[in-house]
Amino acid sequence: MMERLDRFQRAAILTELMEQLRAAGSWCGETHVQKAVYFLQEALKVPLGYRYIFYKYGPYSFDLTEDLTALRADYLIEWNHRSPGYGPSLIPTPWSDQLRQRYPKTLEKYRPAIQSVAQALGRKDVKELEKLATALYVTRQAGAPSDVDSRARRLCELKPHVSLEEAQAAVDEVDQICQRATVTH
């Protein structure tokens, strides 16, 4: 694995990601952050160093959940309970603005990756994020090059509720996201 950024660099990147996701139309709940960080790390090679496992709704990092809890404890993010019946949103606080001002080089280096992920995932709902993150997970497992059909079938094995057509579309979209990321990163 690549060298991992330190705790404060990760905090700057995470809070910037939340700002960018919100600007791109995301609800910015924990699931959105989990999946966006997975894409940042696995597709765009931002060295955040989170360990992901395959879990109920796709790739999930308990380490990231711990960091999000720490960010709340440090008053860098807060929960916003906007609508009954929906999970809370994660909102960066003014303290996070000050933190990000201390890491301009880190943010400058990774901002294109952050913006790319936010644009690609910002308007996706949780079901779409589950499919896309699982497609990326399967792609990373298969190693390149692996054809779309075999990766889509593997996604369906892991997620039987996803149709083959939906799985193929998710794998195609992940390939496009990765290709765009390679060009801009």
Image (tube, rainbow, N blue to C red):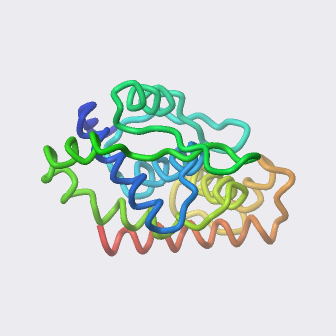
Q: Relative to 49, is 106 on the left or the right?
A: left
Question: Where residue 77 sits in the image (x, y, percent)?
Answer: 40, 39
- Is 104 left or right of 90, judged from the image as shown? left
Q: Quadrant of the N terminus?
A: top left
Numbered-mark total: 0
- In the image, residue 45 sits, relative to residue 8, either above or below, namely below
| The image quarter in which residue 163 lies | bottom right
Residue 50 location in percent, x, y?
43, 35
Q: Position of residue 159 (x, y in %)?
A: 79, 49
Taking the spot 59% from the left edge, 52% from the top edge, the residue there is 142
Q: Quadrant of residue 27?
A: bottom right
Q: Residue at x 36, y 69 (%)?
A: 182
Of residues 16 and 130, which is closer to you in this image?
Answer: 16
Quadrant, the C terminus: bottom left
Image coordinates of residue 114 in percent, x first then y, are 36, 59
Snapshot quadrant of residue 117: bottom left
Q: Between residues 49 and 75, which one lies in front from this camera angle?
A: 75
Q: Residue at x 56, y 42 (%)?
A: 30
Q: Residue at x 13, y 44 (%)?
A: 102
